[in-house]
Image: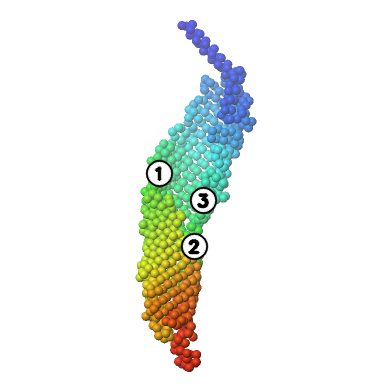
Amino acid sequence: MKKFLIYAVSFVLILSAALFGLLFTSAGNAIVKPILESKIAQATQKPVSLDTFSLGISHLSFSATIDKTSFVKLNGTYNILGKSFDVTFDTSLENIAFDAISITSKMSLKGTAKGDINTIHIIANGKALQGTIAIDANVLDQKSLKDTTLTLEHVEVKELLSLLSQPLYAQGLIDLNANLKNVTPSAVDGLVDFKLHPTALNTEAFTQTLGIDLPQNTTAQANMHALLKGQTITSSLNILSTLSNLKMQKMLYNVSSQTFHSDYAITIHDFSKLEPLTKVLLKGQASMNGEINYSPKGYDATLNSDIMESDTKAHIINDSLIASITNLKLDALMNFLNKPSYTQGDLTLEAKLDSLKALKGTITQHISNGRVNTTLVNKDFNQTLPQSLTYSMQTDAIIDDHLIKATSLLDTSIANISLKNFVYDLKKLDLISEYHVNISDLSKLKDIAQRDLQGKVILDGHIKQSKEALMMDGISSLFGGKFSFKLDNNMFKAALDDAQLSELLSMLTYPDFFTSTIAATIDYDLTNDKGSLKATSNDGRFKQNQLGVLLLAVTGLDITNEIYNTIVFDANILKEIIHFKANMVSQHTHIKTDNGMINQATKDIASKIDIQIRDKNYTAKLSGKTDNPKIKMDTGALLKGLLGESVSDGNKTAKEKAPIQNLLKGLKF
């Protein structure tokens, strides 16, 4: 047994001596050297030359060149039994990639590392990412840090992005100072300061990679201070940019619970600079502030803002939203949208969404003290709104999935309009609704219609709109009859049945010269501003007027007793011009015109009228304005019919002719 132990110990000693001789001699180094070269080349994917490799019992000397552009040097002593070492190192890396890290520009680090298996002290300085780097670290038990500092100065952002294989989003400089008192796998104590110097953002990279269109010449700078204590990180952040400013004065993050809390304040000094982002030119400024909370169980955020001179508040809790806008000024809204101040007023809005994802909730909107700037509207849109036009509006909506269901009431100083059963499809972009219009006093439309009106109108109908089409219809009890219309895209059709002409003339404040029950149809192309109008009647009768008085004197026929069972009126409309013809037949008369014309822009009317009474033919000319037309008769024919042949003989005196001549002067309806 003793002999066996001697042999065993001798064998171990001989084997150990052989291994030491293999590893720590020139022959052993020669065997290990190509293995190390292969491993380094495999890791870097670059050709490697191990220029120096000397591993002795207590000394190490190592020098390797990688792809002729990089090198690594190690020199120092170590004690295997004491597990201690003291080495210097000098590295320079360029155009080398490791996994997701790509080193393109030269990075160098030079320093010392000494200690033992339990405590290592590293001091190093060098250049990285075109800036400087300094490290003073104490590594404990190969897993903790104590009294460690890391300093980076003037590191280039573009180099950092390149190192991380990211697009060139920005060009600028970064400073980082970390003072870590204690770092363990479960806790960190220390301070970290970060500074982003004024940095230019690469708008092309943002557009191509992220689909975000930033304004040209956008710059940003930032400062961040963080206190690390155990599981908690308390930090502050301040970002200044040419677009907006962001302040987060107290951010709290707990590593173990993964909870986050922060306040925030955002200031936008000029919305017009955001046009590439918003795709529309906006104006004005706004400030926003609130709080953010997050945990694995959920999140919530609050917002307060003075946007458009309003008091705006919002609170998001997971998937729900409660928001309110109070006293938003409509003229400020117009300015925000870069529009002239077409209206003033105060807008209030309340929104409660039970689910943002499913879009389910309610919205209420109210506008008070509304007033239209009619001078500006009339000028810009060629309208003739009255000088004073006030309004209020109330809208209540329910949002369910992709459908908005609402009722709305618009009260104005000239008309009231209400919508009910309003449904808007957010997916299809379709709209359907019923509407009700009540104009209680048509005289208030004088400026719009450019003529005197009187009476009232109530109209009910439906609206249907999609991306491809617009359809609208309406019905009303009008002029003692029934009025209906239908709009199909640009084609407008209307019908009037069993209407009283007297009521129509009264509404238009035209002279009430004729009574009749009429039916009319109109077809009009809104795109080309052309169409046709046709009206018929079978029970018309003239009311007493100067024309009737004259005809009674001339013919002995009282036309007010004539019943016109055939009345046809046809008109062709082309923009402002209406060409019309009319045909009226009674038992003893026949009145027609084939070449009438009305200019809606100037209100001029002109027509030649052929009149047949019994067996006599007369001619009249209609002229003047539509609200005060005049008829000029062929006086020769009238006088001849009234005075007989004696007119041509001159037997009547001027005194005898005077009453008739006075009757002819200024003859009108």
Q: Disc 2 versus disc 3: distance between alpha carbons?
A: 35 Å
Image-quadrant location for residue 103:
top right
Amino acid type, label 3: Leu
Quarter placement of the C terminus: bottom left
Q: Indicate which label's residue lies in the foreground, 3 or 1.
A: 3
Q: Are marks 1 and 2 in contact (CB under 8 Å)?
A: no
Amino acid type, label 1: Tyr
- Asked whether, in this view, residue 98 is left or right of residue 370, the answer is right
Crowd around label 2: few <14 · some 14–19 · many ≥20 (10 Å): few
Circle 1 sits in a helix, a strand or a loop, which is it? strand
Residue drawn where x is 40% and y is 85% of the image: 556
Q: Indicate which label's residue lies in the foreground, 1 or 2.
A: 2
Tally of numbered discs: 3
- Mark 1 lies on residue: 299
- Mark 3 lies on residue: 277
Nearest the eye: 318 or 156: 318
Residue 553: image location, x then y, percent:
41, 86
- Mark 2 lies on residue: 527
Residue 199: image location, x then y, percent:
56, 46
Answer with mark 1 or mark 2, whichever residue precedes in sequence: 1
Crowd around label 1: few <14 · some 14–19 · many ≥20 (10 Å): some
Residue 1 bears which disc, if any?
none
Q: Disc 1 versus disc 2: distance between alpha carbons?
A: 53 Å
Q: Disc 3 versus disc 1: distance between alpha carbons?
A: 27 Å
Residue drawn where x is 56% and y is 29% of the image: 43
Q: Indicate which label's residue lies in the foreground, 2 or 3.
A: 2
Circle 2 sits in a helix, a strand or a loop, which is it? loop
Nearest the eye: 149 or 216: 216
Answer with mark 3 or mark 1, whichever residue precedes in sequence: 3
